[in-house]
Each structure stands twice: as structure tokens, then as C-alpha cells.
Amino acid sequence: MRNPESFFPKGRFGGVKAVAPVSMGLSGAGVYAVTTEAGEFFLRLSAPGQEGFDEMLAALKLAAGEGIAPRVVFAAHNDGAVVTERARGIPIGAALARPGVRQHVLRRVAETLARLHAIPAPDLPVMD
């Protein structure tokens, strides 16, 4: 197993304060919430050299550039690793469980998906 802390060199991130697995994703990647002296991040670990990694990374960067996804801080294709800034907010499941905000949350999800799909990406293949 790869050590999540190894993707956070002290010279760039300061000391690692906490690493916690995040188990809500559907991609099969290992995802970790990592807190360092430099801030809070997510680490996504896919299979090293995974097919489609470069396209996925390009899509993440496009979405981040539009303010839809967190900024990519570091990526290593050979390791299948992507570090992003940690997203703020509450999990969508928790937001949807609140009847007073459910309609607003669903509307924002639809609006955000529309913005995401409107991003020009002529160099990316069609993917899920």
C-alpha cells in the first residue's frame, strides 16, 4: 500500500497533521483528507499508470479553472496521484437531508452540471 503522507513533502506542505480515508467515492480510487501545516487537501490515489489518467487530470484542471472543482495542487501520473485543495461545504447527502434547503441544493447541482458540461474541451475524449 502506498503511504499517503509520501505525496506531501515537508518542504512544500510543512508537516502532515492528519490523514483520514474518505469512503464516499464511487471511482474505486483511494481518497484521503489530508491536513498539513500548509492547509487542507484531498489526495486521490488511482492505479499507477492508469489509462485515462491524463484526460481525467485535464478535466479536473478545466473544472477548477471555471471554479467548479478545487484547484489541482500536485499530480503524478506514474503514481496515479492527484492532490487538490480541500473542497469546502457539507456533503451533498447531508444537504439533501435538510428539507428546508433540498430544493435549492438540487437547483444548484443542476446549474453546476450545466456549467460543467458547457466548458469547451475539444482535446478531451467523451467520458463518464
Image (cartoon, grey):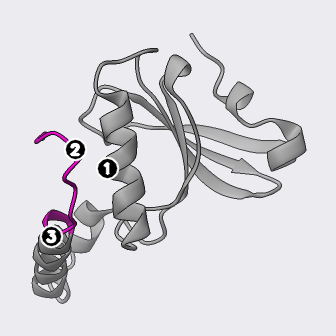
Q: Is residue 96 above or below residue 108?
A: above
Q: Amino acid at mark 2?
A: Leu
The magenta stretch is 116-128
Q: How much space separates mark 2 and mark 3, taking CA atoms?
A: 13 Å
Secondary structure of the magenta portion, mostly? loop
- Which of disc 1 and disc 2 is earlier in sequence? 1
Q: Amino acid at mark 1?
A: Ala
Point out residue 10 in the picture as x, y percentages from the top left corner. Answer: 87, 39
Using residue 47 as the reference point, say whether residue 94 is left or right of it.
left
Disc 2 to disc 1: CB gap under 8 Å:
yes
Using residue 23 as the reference point, say whether residue 116 is left or right of it.
left
Hey, which quadrant is residue 30 in on the image? top left
- Which of disc 3 and disc 2 is earlier in sequence? 3
Q: Which mark is residue 124?
A: 2
Point out residue 61 in the picture as x, y percentages from the top left corner. Answer: 42, 55
Residue 93 visible in this rendered orientation of the protein: yes
Using residue 48 as the reference point, say whether residue 25 is left or right of it.
left
Closer to us: mark 2 or mark 3?
2
Nearer to me, 12 or 88:
12
Q: Amino acid at mark 3?
A: Ala
Circle 1: element type: helix
Q: Which residue is mark 3?
A: 118
Q: Is residue 12 above or below residue 2?
A: below
